[in-house]
Image (tube, grey):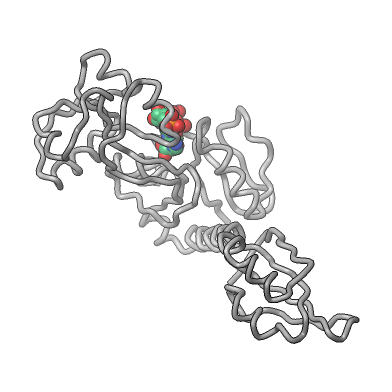
């Protein structure tokens, strides 16, 4: 049986999160430092460690069968490599920024300007869509210093916290593209029954890890008389579990809820008489 070859970033912002995700999917991966290829011990998967910029092309050319890469890189490279699943990490935005003192009031003011970027293709599409003529200067790094060097009027670069912009006295003017890490694959992989079988298994596990990350297990004790009210309040994925307690007037209620809803319902639960409220993490959630 052949392995699925999965390309991930060798050393960078996506490396640790990619390996962490694979481990949460139950893959037994040995320490990966200084290795170019690592094989999972309990799953037919081989990990290739590559520069992120090379991943879309390697997947397109079947050097790898799948990969984990940022959408910014995927769309910039314009390959036939396909996005299969968003992974919820490596979030950032590609934006246009201007020097603090030269405020841009409307998008039309970009017309005739010079923009430095490492993402010429994504920027070209954005300008075309907005019917703007601007000169693109392609730089491979340190884009943020281009305006102060007089190389460009504006920049189009990746931002996450905004610290780099602030340090270089730049301000965001327009959002071009929102990005996160994604699992990618190719037609060739999908058309290969054996490889596709492994890919679908991996995808199922990734989805269950994502569901679990977005959900929590809620437990509480309630007076029997409050059951109807409590069930109304709980934003449960399924009908909550109701258990008897030694105290005949009380019940225990368990439910899986979306993590981000907890703080919205806690006061209502307490007002309805809930006590001993526990919120627990879930390791896997298969729906
Ligand atoms: O060596 P290799 O080519 O593999 O790595 P790389 O240096 O090209 O990429 P790397 O590790 O920096 O980023 C990998 C991926 O992480 C990117 O393609 C994005 O999808 C994602 N990502 C998330 C980011 C950021 N956040 C980010 N903040 N990529 C880059 N940055 C840079 C940005 O270019 C700018 O210089 O960080 C700076 C801005 O950060 P803030 O926090 O100051 O706003
Ligand atoms: Zn790179």
Eyeballing the image, is 156 above or below 68?
Answer: above
Give the tally of numbered discs.
0
Eyeballing the image, is 26 above or below 236?
Answer: above
Q: Quadrant of the N terminus?
A: bottom right
- Seen in the image, is 201 located left or right of residue 225? left
Residue 37 image-quadrant placement: top right
Question: Would you say residue 65 is visible in this rendering?
Answer: no
As drawn, the residue found furthest toward the top would be 149
Question: Would you say residue 26 is visible in this rendering?
Answer: yes
Q: Quadrant of the C terminus?
A: bottom right
Q: Quadrant of ligand 1?
A: top left
Position of residue 236 measured from the top left corner of the image (x, y, whole percent): 60, 74
Position of residue 214 measured from the top left corner of the image (x, y, whole percent): 57, 59
As drawn, the residue found furthest toward the front would be 271
Residue 55 image-quadrant placement: top left
Q: Residue at x 78, y 77 (%)?
A: 252
Residue 146 image-quadrant placement: top left
Position of residue 246 measured from the top left corner of the image (x, y, whole percent): 90, 81
Q: Residue at x 51, y 62 (%)?
A: 200
Instruction: Between residue 219 and residue 125, name the one nearer to us.
Output: 219
As drawn, the residue found furthest toward the right would be 246
- Seen in the image, is 31 located left or right of residue 276? left
Q: Residue at x 41, y 41 (%)?
A: 92
Instruction: Between residue 29 and residue 176, name the one nearer to us.
Output: 176
Instruction: Between residue 189 and residue 154, name the one nearer to us.
Output: 154
Q: Residue at x 10, y 34 (%)?
A: 111
Position of residue 151 measured from the top left corner of the image (x, y, whole percent): 21, 16
């Amino acid at each position: 049986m052949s392995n699925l070859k999965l390309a991930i970033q060798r050393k960078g912002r996506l490396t640790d999160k990619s390996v962490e995700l694979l481990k949460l999917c139950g893959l037994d991966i040995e320490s990966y430092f200084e290795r170019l290829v690592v094989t999972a011990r309990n799953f037919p998967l081989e990990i290739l460690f590559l520069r992120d910029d090379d991943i879309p092309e390697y997947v397109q050319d079947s050097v790898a069968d799948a990969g984990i890469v940022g959408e910014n890189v995927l769309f910039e490279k314009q390959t036939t490599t396909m996005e299969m699943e968003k992974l919820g990490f490596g979030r950032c935005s590609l934006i246009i920024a201007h020097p603090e003192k030269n405020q841009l009031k409307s998008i039309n003011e970009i017309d005739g300007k010079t923009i430095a970027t490492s993402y010429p293709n994504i920027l070209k599409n954005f300008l075309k869509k907005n019917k703007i003529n601007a000169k693109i200067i392609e730089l491979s790094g340190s884009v943020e210093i281009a305006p102060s060097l007089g190389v460009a009027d504006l920049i189009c670069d990746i931002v996450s916290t905004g610290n780099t912009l602030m340090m270089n006295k730049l301000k965001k003017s327009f959002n071009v593209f929102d990005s996160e890490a994604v699992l990618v694959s190719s037609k060739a992989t999908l058309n290969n029954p054996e490889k596709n079988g492994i890919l679908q298994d991996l995808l199922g596990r990734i989805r269950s890890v994502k569901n679990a990350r977005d959900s929590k297990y809620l437990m509480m004790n309630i007076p029997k008389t409050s059951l109807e009210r409590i069930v109304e309040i709980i934003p449960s994925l399924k009908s909550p579990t109701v258990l008897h307690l030694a105290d005949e007037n009380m019940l225990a209620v368990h439910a899986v809820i979306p993590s981000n809803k907890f703080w919205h319902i806690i006061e209502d639960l307490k007002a309805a008489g809930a006590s001993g409220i526990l919120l627990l993490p879930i390791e896997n959630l298969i729906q």
